[in-house]
Image (tube, rainbow, N blue to C red):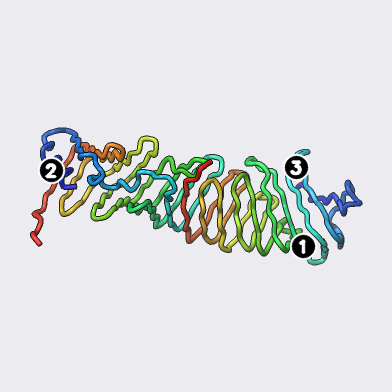
Amino acid sequence: MIALYFIGRARDNRGEEISLKSDLELQGEFLASRAEDGQVRFWMQGRDFNYNNDQGQAEFAEPEIKILTAQGIVSVKGKTGNYFRDTRQVRMRDQVEMRFNKYLAQTSELIYDIEGRKCSGGREIAVHGDGLEFKGKGYIFDFRTGQIEILSDIKGRFVKRAI
Amino acid sequence: MRRIVSAVALGLALASAVFAQKQNAKTEIAFSGFTWKPGETVEIDADKMSLSLNERRATFEGKVVVRKAASQIHCDRLTVNYLQSGQVSQLLASGAVKLSEGKSLAAGDELEYLKDANKIWLRGNPELVDGGQTVQGEEMEFDLSRSLLVVTSPRIQFEKVKNE
């Protein structure tokens, strides 16, 4: 299994690798990344990262993750974030925005499964882009296939627009 | 619509029949609501949706309702191919398909709409009902540009219209 390493920017600590095996507090802005097969495919940044090793989770503010996918880079922002060591998931809450290609998805909670390369959530979601506007409840975005599923209560429309 | 059905009666002996209406502003073929006009929208409700970003393809399942101008489609499953502009280029509906506009109602197993052709095809035991008159056939083609309905192997039933 590929370990998740944090390249502690902490602005001043660029390049230092820190594995999550002890409590960790990063004050101010931080930037973390994860490489797979020699290529960086996942970035996570935010503010005030506090990791509790006993609980196996971290809290941080203003989270933003970027994921390199076959569809390009997907960017996800929120107001509050958690990282869960054992499940290797990142959870974002409050005014969560996901941008990919020319699409924008807005929801209030999102969980990113780092190993599965999927975003999911049970809350309402609105997706806009390429002339479509759809809302629904519950979603799964599989970055491997480039498919978004909205699981219930679909309402929306296609709007022809001038390019 | 009655002109269409009247024409059907004349064409009963043919293996396939072509029914044309006079093209003017007042005589429109049923389901002309699917003729695309700038700024119009296609509204869709469903239980579930899957969006393939690379293909610009959306698939809807469960209690699917499509609203386009005065026309509506009800079906179990719908695939929509769309362009970057949001223009719907193709609709593929299946499972208990019902297409309605005003007093016109058509039903079948499958429906296809192609924007470039500006046509709707209804397949799988298609049936068109309007004003107590029923047309059935192997396939129905609604040519929205030419206000033309083509029914392959048509069968027609008439009901006497009650005087009001």
User: Do tag 3 and tag 2 residues touch (Cβ < 8 Å)?
Assistant: no
Q: Chain of mark 1?
A: A
Kind of residue sitting beneath label 3: Glu
Is A85 left, or right, of B28 in this rendering? right
Q: Report the residue marked by disc 2.
A: B6
Q: Give the image location of residue B36, x and y in percent.
A: 38, 44
Q: Give the image location of residue B97, x and y in percent.
A: 32, 50
Is A126 left, or right, of A49 in this rendering? left
Q: Which callout, 2 or 1, points to the residue nearer the camera?
A: 2
Secondary structure found at label 3: strand
Q: Chain of mark 2?
A: B
In the rendered structure, which disc, 3 or 1, sits on the residue that comes first in sequence? 3
Residue B126 in sight:
no
CA distance for labels 3 and 2: 69 Å
Kind of residue sitting beneath label 1: Ala
- Image point (56%, 47%), residue name: A147
Q: Chain of mark 3?
A: A
Q: Is residue A152 above or below residue A142?
A: below
Q: Which mark is residue A61?
A: 1
Residue A114 in sight:
yes
Q: Which mark is residue A36?
A: 3
Say yes or no: labels 3 and 1 on the same chain.
Answer: yes
Say yes or no: labels 2 and 1 on the same chain.
Answer: no
Secondary structure found at label 1: strand
